[in-house]
Image (tube, rainbow, N blue to C red):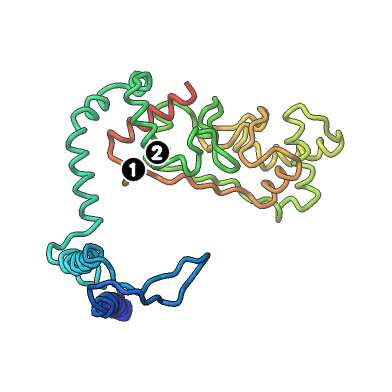
């Protein structure tokens, strides 16, 4: 924390505590007895008497002030001051995570020795995997794994990089990076429109025959290397199947043309450094179970 903010917090906190204490004690000096004198405030015939706080209420305020001062001495709360015991949220979190890992390591090791297909049927593994999924994957793929625009649905049988246990585990460990190039400078507007028309035709939709024929030439020249000459994709490159009506970025002519024009470069982050081997194994089983 910068020196300015360090002293800003200390001064502001100190002034606040001193001010509250002064207000409390200044009002206490009015005396212990009650009086008929009012503050002048009245509403619906109800007047506010100018009496001091009851003793029990006053001492409760004193206790909270003393407790606050003691807390700021023991725990960090005054800028960069670490507190007497040196406690931090980060260190407590690390200790709790380490304790949990030690507690469940034996169970996870047992699951690690089993195949993904086998543990994917275990309700306990599915429950643990769903929590791992919620913490690490649901932000993009949704809580139910059904994805959304630009993020794959993990519950169907359509996989960009393959849906086998090994393929899923590789994706989790190493991540995935799409590499759909932009073709605007190569094809131009007319070529983009023709290529989009041909891709639409691969789904059995009605298209312009002449434009489709032009688009097929472009497709075979520039797109078949990744998507295959029949447009059914290639899991080695993560190239999607263009014939089954399942679209990651939308399947309208306009959306397909935009993909061809600008390209797509989606990134699936790697979790090999943030999740242990046993957690990756359990998460793989959960993802595998979503579509099996």
Q: Is residue 33 above or below residue 159?
A: below
Rendering coords of residue 31 (x, y %):
23, 77
Q: Residue 10 — which label?
A: none
Rendering coords of residue 250 (x, y %):
67, 40
Rendering coords of residue 132 (x, y %):
36, 37
* SS class, disc 1: loop
Q: Residue at x 83, y 30 (%)?
A: 206
Q: Residue at x 28, y 22 (%)?
A: 114
Distance, label 1 to label 2, CA atoms, is: 7 Å
99 or 58, which is in the foreground?
A: 58
First in sequence: mark 1 vs mark 2:
2
Residue 76 can be seen, yes or no = no
Q: Residue 172 — which label?
A: 2
- Reading the image, the residue beneath label 1 is 272
Q: Residue at x 21, y 55 (%)?
A: 91
Q: Is residue 38 above or below residue 228?
A: below
Query: Is 164 left or right of 201, judged from the image as shown?
Result: left
Q: Are marks 1 and 2 in contact (CB under 8 Å)?
A: yes
Report how many numbered discs are placed on residues in the image.
2
Query: Is 246 left or right of 62, judged from the image as shown?
Result: right
174 or 141, which is in the foreground?
A: 141
């Amino acid at each position: 924390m910068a020196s300015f903010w360090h002293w800003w917090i200390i001064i502001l906190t100190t002034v606040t505590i001193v001010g509250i204490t002064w207000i409390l004690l200044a009002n206490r000096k009015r005396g212990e007895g009650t009086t008929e004198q009012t503050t002048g405030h009245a509403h619906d015939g109800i007047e506010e008497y100018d009496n001091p706080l009851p003793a029990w209420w006053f001492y409760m305020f004193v206790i909270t002030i003393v407790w606050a001062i003691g807390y700021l001495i023991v725990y960090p709360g005054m800028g960069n001051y670490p507190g007497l015991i040196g406690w931090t949220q980060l260190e407590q979190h690390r200790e709790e995570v380490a304790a949990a890992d030690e507690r469940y390591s034996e169970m996870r090791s047992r699951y690690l020795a089993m195949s993904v297909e086998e543990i994917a049927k275990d309700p306990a593994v599915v429950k643990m995997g769903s929590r791992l999924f919620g913490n690490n994957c649901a932000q993009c793929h949704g809580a139910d794994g059904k994805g959304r625009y630009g993020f794959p649905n993990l519950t169907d049988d359509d996989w960009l990089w393959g849906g086998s246990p090994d393929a899923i585990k590789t994706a989790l460990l190493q991540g995935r990076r799409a590499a759909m190039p932009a073709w605007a400078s190569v094809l131009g507007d007319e070529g983009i429109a023709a290529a989009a028309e041909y891709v639409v035709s691969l789904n059995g939709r009605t298209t312009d025959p002449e434009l489709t024929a032009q688009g097929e030439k472009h497709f075979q020249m520039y797109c078949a290397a990744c998507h295959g000459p029949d447009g059914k994709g290639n899991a080695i490159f993560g190239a999607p199947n263009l014939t089954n009506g399942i679209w990651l970025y939308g399947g309208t002519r306009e959306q397909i043309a935009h993909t061809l024009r600008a390209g797509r470069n989606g990134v699936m982050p790697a979790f090999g450094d943030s999740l242990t081997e046993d957690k990756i194994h359990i998460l793989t089983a959960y993802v595998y179970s979503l579509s099996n």
